[in-house]
Image (cartoon, rainbow, N blue to C red):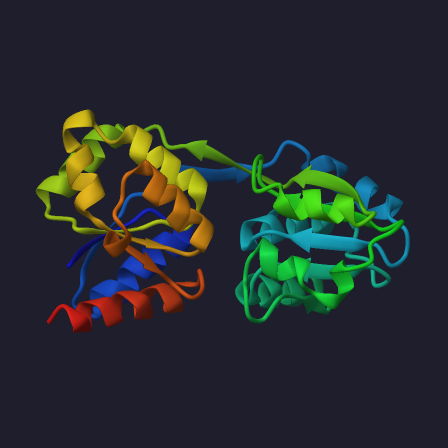
C-alpha cells in the first residue's frame, strides 16, 4: 500500500510521518494552501454585536487559529455569555483550549448533520449564529438553522487557495511511484484532485482506494466514477482515525 495524503498544512505532513513510522509508504501533496481570511478585521465588531446567548461555530482548527490571533492582536477575547460549537471533537477541544470557553460538539456524528441533531439546535427562534469558516463550505448547517428560526452570519477566517505547483505533473509522479491509496478529507479536495489529474491518468485515479471522512464525500466519489469497493470510510477525520482505518485495510490485505 502506497498512500497519497492530500490534507493541507502541517496536519497532512503529520499523518504522513505517522504512516511512515508504521512502515507504510506515504507522501504529502496538498492541493490547497491556507491563508488568512479577508474578513478577519471585522471579527471583534461582529463578535461584540451578538446578543447574549447567541451561538458561535468554528468549522475547523484553522478557523480557530486565525480567529484567536485576530482577537489577541486587537485586545479582544471570546465573550463568556455566548455559546460555542464545533463540528468535531478535535476542533472542539482545540477551540475550548484557545478560547478558554466550553465548546459543544456532536459525539456520534462529527459533521453538520450531527450538529443539527444537538438539543441546542432544535429551537433557534431569534438566535444569531456566527459561523467562523473558510472562503467556502457546506451550506447545510446554515440552511437548516434558518428554517428553524436563526439568523446566520458568516465570517471568513481563512482561505483555501490552490497551490501554485504543477499539480497534474505531481499526480503523474504519484502514479509512477505506485500510489494506490489516496486520503481525501473534503469535497473541495476531491473535486480538485479529479480536475487536476490528466485525462490519461484518470483510470489510475479511479482504480486507487479512496479514504474519505463522510458519506457525503463517498457519494460524490461514486458520482465521479469510483466503485463502492474502492471507497473506504473513516469513522472520524482526525489523523489517528485515518491512520487506524488504513492500518485495518493494510492488515486485511496481508
Residue 101 visible, this angle:
no
Query: Residue 79, image x and y in percent?
Result: 82, 58
The C terminus, quarter of image: bottom left
Q: Nearer the viewer, residue 221 or 180?
A: 221
**Most foreground residue, 110 or 239:** 110
Which quarter of the rendering shows the N terminus?
bottom left
Q: Based on the displayed image, in which of its 4 quarters is residue 11 positioned?
A: bottom left
Q: In which quarter of the image is residue 154?
A: top right
The x, y position of residue 222, in whole percent, is 33, 44
The residue shown at (64%, 65%) is 105
Side (left or right) of 67 relative to 8: right
- Left or right: 49 as drawn, with respect to 14: right
At horizontal 40% and vertical 42% (from top left) the residue drawn is 220
Q: In which quarter of the image is residue 117?
A: bottom right
- Relative to 24, say whether 183 is above or below: above
Q: Is 56 drawn above or below residue 153 in the view shown?
A: below
Q: Provide residue 58's location: percent of width, then percent of height.
A: 64, 53
The answer to whether residue 32 is above or below residue 22 is above
**Residue at the image point whose x is 20% and y is 33% from the top:** 202
Left or right, residue 7 beside residue 132:
left
| Residue in the image at 14% along x and 68% along y | 253
Q: Nearer the viewer, residue 126 or 28?
A: 126
Q: Is residue 253 visible?
A: yes
Q: Nearer the viewer, residue 94 or 185?
A: 185
Taking 32 as reference, is 249 above or below it?
A: below
Amino acid at each position: 500500500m502506497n498512500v497519497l495524503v492530500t490534507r493541507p498544512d502541517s496536519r497532512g505532513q503529520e499523518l504522513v510521518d505517522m504512516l511512515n513510522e508504521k512502515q507504510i509508504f506515504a507522501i504529502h501533496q496538498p492541493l490547497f494552501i491556507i491563508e488568512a481570511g479577508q474578513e478577519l478585521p471585522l471579527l471583534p465588531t461582529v463578535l461584540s454585536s451578538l446578543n447574549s446567548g447567541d451561538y458561535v461555530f468554528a468549522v475547523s482548527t484553522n478557523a480557530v487559529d486565525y480567529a484567536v490571533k485576530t482577537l489577541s492582536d486587537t485586545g479582544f477575547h471570546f465573550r463568556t455569555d455566548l455559546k460555542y460549537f464545533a463540528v468535531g471533537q478535535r476542533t472542539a477541544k482545540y477551540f475550548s483550549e484557545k478560547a478558554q470557553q466550553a465548546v459543544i460538539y456532536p459525539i456520534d456524528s462529527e459533521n453538520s448533520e450531527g450538529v443539527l441533531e444537538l438539543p441546542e439546535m432544535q429551537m433557534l427562534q431569534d438566535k444569531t449564529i456566527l459561523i467562523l469558516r473558510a472562503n467556502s463550505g457546506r451550506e447545510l448547517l446554515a440552511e437548516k438553522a434558518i428554517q428553524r428560526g436563526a439568523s446566520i452570519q458568516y465570517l471568513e477566517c481563512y482561505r483555501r487557495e490552490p497551490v501554485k505547483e504543477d499539480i497534474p505533473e505531481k499526480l503523474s509522479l504519484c502514479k509512477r511511484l505506485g500510489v494506490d491509496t489516496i486520503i481525501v478529507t473534503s469535497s473541495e479536495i476531491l473535486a480538485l484532485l479529479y480536475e487536476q489529474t490528466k485525462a490519461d491518468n484518470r483510470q489510475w485515479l479511479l482504480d486507487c482506494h479512496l479514504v474519505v471522512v463522510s458519506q457525503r464525500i463517498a457519494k460524490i466519489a461514486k458520482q465521479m466514477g469510483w466503485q463502492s469497493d474502492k471507497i473506504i470510510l473513516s469513522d472520524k477525520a482526525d489523523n489517528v482515525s485515518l491512520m487506524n482505518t488504513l492500518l485495518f485495510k493494510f492488515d486485511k490485505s496481508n
